[in-house]
Structures are given as structure tokens and as C-alpha cells.
Amino acid sequence: MGTLDKVIPSESGQLLKARVPSSHLTYIWDAAHALEFDQPKRVSALMLDFLDRGESFLVRPAAPAAGERGVAGRPRA
């Protein structure tokens, strides 16, 4: 969350953090609502740190049911 955000108050982030298990709340100094535009280097650094810690993961799509087709009618891999 940006410390200068006028759209979403910082209290909202605290409420979400309290209700979402294993979540992280970070405030970015001198950033408003569009964090990635106001402070792109800081946002990138936070994202890379999060990914480097290995706390994120990709969920592989479930295997298709028999006869199910994927995108453009092709069988899914």
C-alpha cells in the first residue's frame, strides 16, 4: 500500500492483513494508489524479494477430463 494513497485508506490494508492468513502487508513510502507507477523500483524490489523467498508458487491446471478440449479446441497438455 502507498503511504499517500487517497483511494484506499491504510486501515483497509490492516483489516485485510488481519483476515488473510499468511499474508504480508507492506507500505511503500511516497507512493499513492498506483504503486507501480509512483515507485516502480521499490515495487519491483518487493516483488523480487517475495519471489526469491519462495513463498509464492504456480498452480498447474488440473488434468482435463476425458474428451475435454483446451484453448482453440486443441487437447490440453
Image (spheres, rainbow, N blue to C red):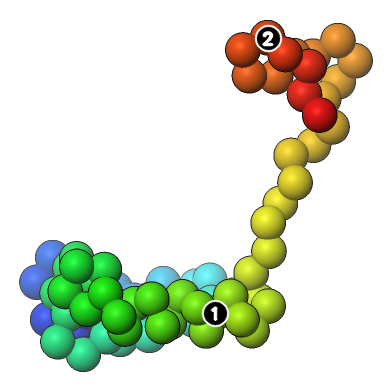
Q: Is residue 62 visible?
A: yes
Near-viewer residue (24 or 73): 73
| Secondary element at image label 2 | helix
Quarter location, residue 61: top right
Residue 76 locus on image (x, y percent) = 77, 24
Q: Residue at x 75, y 46 (%)?
A: 60
Residue 74 locus on image (x, y percent) = 72, 13
Please state if 77 lies on the left or on the right of 10 as rendered: right
Residue 18 locus on image (x, y percent) = 47, 79
- Quadrant where the image shows the N terminus: bottom left
| Secondary element at image label 1 | helix
Q: Residue at x 27, y 85 (%)?
A: 28
Please state if 48 lies on the left or on the right of 35 as rendered: right
**Which residue carries the number 2 mark?**
73
Label 2 – label 1 distance at C-alpha:
36 Å
Please state if 33 lies on the left or on the right of 26 as rendered: left
Near-viewer residue (59 or 74): 74
Indicate the amino acid at tag 2: Gly
Crowd class of label 1 (few under 14; some 14 to 19; many from 20; radius 10 Å): few
Q: Residue at x 81, y 29 (%)?
A: 77
Indicate the amino acid at tag 1: Phe
Please state if 63 lies on the left or on the right of 11 as rendered: right
Crowd class of label 2 (few under 14; some 14 to 19; many from 20; radius 10 Å): few
- Residue 1 to residue 63: above or below: below
**Which residue carries the number 1 mark?**
50
Residue 59 locus on image (x, y percent) = 71, 51
Q: Residue at x 14, y 87 (%)?
A: 30
- Residue 36 to residue 50: above or below: above
Total label count?
A: 2
